[in-house]
Amino acid sequence: MIKKIKGTYDILPEESEKWQKIEDVMKNVARIFNFKEIRTPIFEASELFHRSVGQSSDIVKKETYDFKDRGNRSNTLRPEGTAPIVRAVIENKLYADASQPQKLYYYGPMFRYERPQKGRQRQFHQFGAEIIGSSSPLVDVEIINFAITYLQALNIKDIVIKVNSLGDKASKKQYLEVLSEYLEPNINKLCKDCQRRHKENPLRVLDCKVDQDNPVVLAAPKPLDYLSDSAKYHFDHVVLGLESLGLNFEIDKNLVRGLDYYTHTVFEIISESDKLGSQSTLVGGGRYNDLISDLDGPDTPAVGFAFGAERIILALENSAFFAEESEIHAYFINLDNVFENDALKIINDLRLGGLIIDYDFLNRSLKAQFKQADRVNARYYLIYGEKEASEHKINVKNAKTGEQETVNLDDLYQYLLSKFQNSNISKACEGCNGC
Ligand code: HAM
């Protein structure tokens, strides 16, 4: 039997309802913040990720899915969404669009060859947002607020918001020199990974899990202490904005993030719930003012975030948000041959009016049809056979109370609608009648 590839998984129908729910909330929150969706290809030229995420990052060093196409070009399955969005913005000249800044969001699968565990897969989904074209600290606040609002809309609590600043290009460069000089004589006191990292990516030493209590790391100089005046002004105003929104956040001087493109603000939201195990970071993001020019676009500031959707699903495990069982409006109980009466037409008309209707395809007995109706959680049974057809009527029975009424077929749709007027099962759509 052919099995799924390690680190991937199937989202089966019962699970996919949960996914649709978190995706709906995502779209609604994006809408109230006035972000527009952008969709880019799942694979890109490998060079895009090498030049953006960074040669020294774990992602590029050991996690990308690279392949040669039949034209011998190096392609990579996207490990994240920011670089492809930036590529698309440059290629489609969205930076020159009259509407600035561009407020974009995206959702889709990403691929990283990581060691799979709870909350960490090789194919996973990110919901991300990017604001491109403004250096205002208000934009950093907008993006962080967007991320938090999404979590609030899902009623995910027990979270910690961490923010830090890496400074602008000049202050980051100066800081990296200071940090390297500091680490050099202490190198043997660091873990194996950090001994390697300290040369190519010294920033990562600060957020090393193994060395987090190491006195060398604790006493290391921090980026926040090396900000230029303008970088400090920027960060102070981000903090002011978050405070004026009444958000509870902490400044984590060791927060550096694992991708090379960040400047200024970086942030993460961590779940404190034990449902997520060791992979507790729900969302990570920050500013990347130099990435667009580094990728040969015009000098354009930007900031963004990305959620791991699998981690959102884990955080919502057993929550009221998923408790509601899915229901359908009615199940059509077919007493006789549907081909010889108007059953198919009746069902279809109700569906085109936006009602969720199902019926039997397995030639079940009457009893088994009622059973199936209960299995799919139908609110009403629509009982119909030759006799009803000859009278142009149908029997509508409430599945819970057992109450039954005979309704003229011409009134069926309105009759059902009236039954669902104040109900939590809404029409699936506005209905296609006439469209
Ligand atoms: P990242 O921190 O690499 O940032 O990923 C963002 C989120 O994606 C993580 O916080 C986590 O929830 C989820 N994630 C990452 N890897 C996995 C995995 N293997 N399995 C499950 N979930 C995972 C970025 O990707 C940046 N592009 C974020 C960003 C947007 N920065 C600016 N704009």
Image (cartoon, helix red, strand yellow):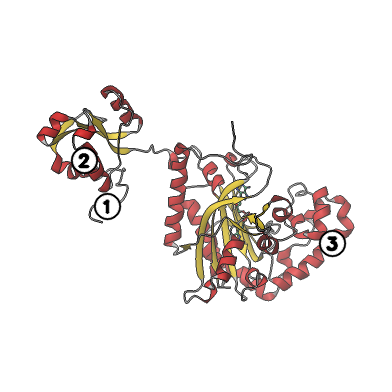
Label 2 sits on residue:
346
Element class at badge 2:
helix
Label 1 sits on residue:
432
Neighbourhood count class around disc 3 (C-alpha, 10 Å): few under 14, some 14–19, many 20 upward = some
**What's the CA distance linking mark 3 and mark 2?**
78 Å
Q: Mark 3 or 1 closer to N-term?
A: 3
The amino acid marked with disc number 3 is Tyr
Q: Quadrant of residue 401?
A: top left
Q: Mark 3 or 2 closer to N-term?
A: 3
Label 3 sits on residue:
182
Q: Classify 305 as above or below 379.
A: below
Front of the two marks 3 and 1: 1
Q: Position of residue 419 (x, y in %)?
A: 22, 41
The amino acid marked with disc number 1 is Cys
Marks 3 and 2: CB-CB under 8 Å? no
**Front in this rendered view, residue 18 or 410:** 410
Q: Position of residue 58 (x, y in %)?
A: 72, 53
Q: Classify 425 as above or below 108.
A: above
Element class at badge 1:
loop
Neighbourhood count class around disc 1 (C-alpha, 10 Å): few under 14, some 14–19, many 20 upward = few
Element class at badge 3:
helix
Is 208 on the left-hand or right-hand side of 429? right
**Front in this rendered view, residue 119 or 208:** 119
Q: Position of residue 267 (x, y in %)?
A: 62, 59
Q: Quadrant of the N terminus?
A: top right
Which residue is at the far left?
391
**Front in this rendered view, residue 249 or 195:** 195
Q: Mark 1 or 2 closer to N-term?
A: 2
Residue 26 visible in the shown view? yes
